Amino acid sequence: MKIGIIGNGKMGQAIGKAAEKRNHQVILVVDLENQDDMNAQTLGHVDVVFEFTHPTAAPHNIKTCFNYNIPVVCGTTGWLDQFDELADYCRQHNKTLFYAPNFSLGVNILSRINRSLAKMMNQFPQYQVEIEETHHIHKIDAPSGTAISLAEDIISAMDRIDQWEKAGQNQKGALPVRSIRESDIPGRHVVSFESEFDKLEIHHSSKSREGFAMGAILAGEFILGKQGVYGMDDLLSL
């Protein structure tokens, strides 16, 4: 693949390195200093764009790529209030979008386990559920997109939970989500079910950004030649 990367931060750089390991070629890197390079001439030579920027910039960047018929793999979180609109546009105009709040294969396997566990725990009201996520101090959004996704899956499966909240608000029927920002931790997510007598936890800890980057590259390979909106469940169902 000939790859374009929008956002030359730590994830963008990790994606560039992962692409080289898979024998792909990075031919375009766009950051704040050269945003004008997102044009027909430069994007016209790109097979897939990887968008890892800021929630205020992501929708515009995705639409720009759509205008030039370039498939997009997006991992920017914090803009999901506009996701449905963009997804509808993508389907109606035969564009291609792969979105995931987290591209780690391990995290997405955790998500599947989380959905199954939540359905099982629905019949045991003595267990209180909580999510805790820990990331590096430079991560902008809190809770993380992955934590919100885990929470929404629990809400869908459990009758006694109807919303999530930031930990400490203590609303009835709400799932507390605790966010911790420290050091340079790539990411850790813990889902816990605790009763008077015991505590059950499932968790995932990332060792480096390379796992996220490799998952994104696999997503880019997956959407080549496809149209529509995809996510990690589609990739894991291969």
Image (tube, grey):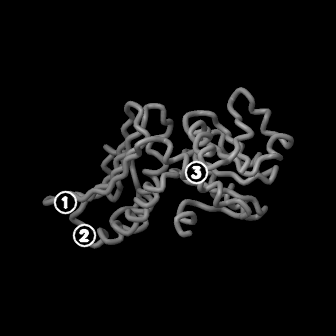
Secondary structure category for the residue under label 1 = loop
User: Which disc, if any, is residue 10?
Assistant: none
Q: CA distance from mark 3 to mark 2?
A: 37 Å
Residue name at image x 80 percent, y 54 percent? 69
Q: Mark 1 belongs to which amino acid?
A: Ser
Q: Position of residue 82 (x, y in %)?
A: 63, 51
| 145 to the left or right of 231 | left
Of label 1 and label 2, which has the lower sequence position? 2
Q: Mark 2 belongs to which amino acid?
A: Phe
Badge 2 crowding class, 10 Å Cα cut-off, few under 14, some 14 to 19, many 20 or more, is few
Above or below residue 120? Residue 180 is above
Please tell me in which quadrant of the rendered image residue 31 appears. Answer: top right
Q: Between 25 and 197, which is closer to the camera in this rendering? A: 25
Residue hosting label 3: 216
Secondary structure category for the residue under label 2 = loop
> What is the total number of numbered labels drawn onto the structure image?
3
Residue name at image x 69 percent, y 55 percent? 86
Residue hosting label 1: 195
Q: CA distance from mark 1 to mark 3?
A: 38 Å
Residue hosting label 2: 124
Q: Between 59 and 110, which is closer to the camera in this rendering? A: 110
Q: Mark 3 belongs to which amino acid?
A: Ala
Residue name at image x 86 percent, y 41 percent? 41
Above or below residue 138? Residue 100 is below
Badge 1 crowding class, 10 Å Cα cut-off, few under 14, some 14 to 19, many 20 or more, is few
Q: Position of residue 92 (x, y in %)?
A: 76, 64
Q: Residue furthest left?
A: 197
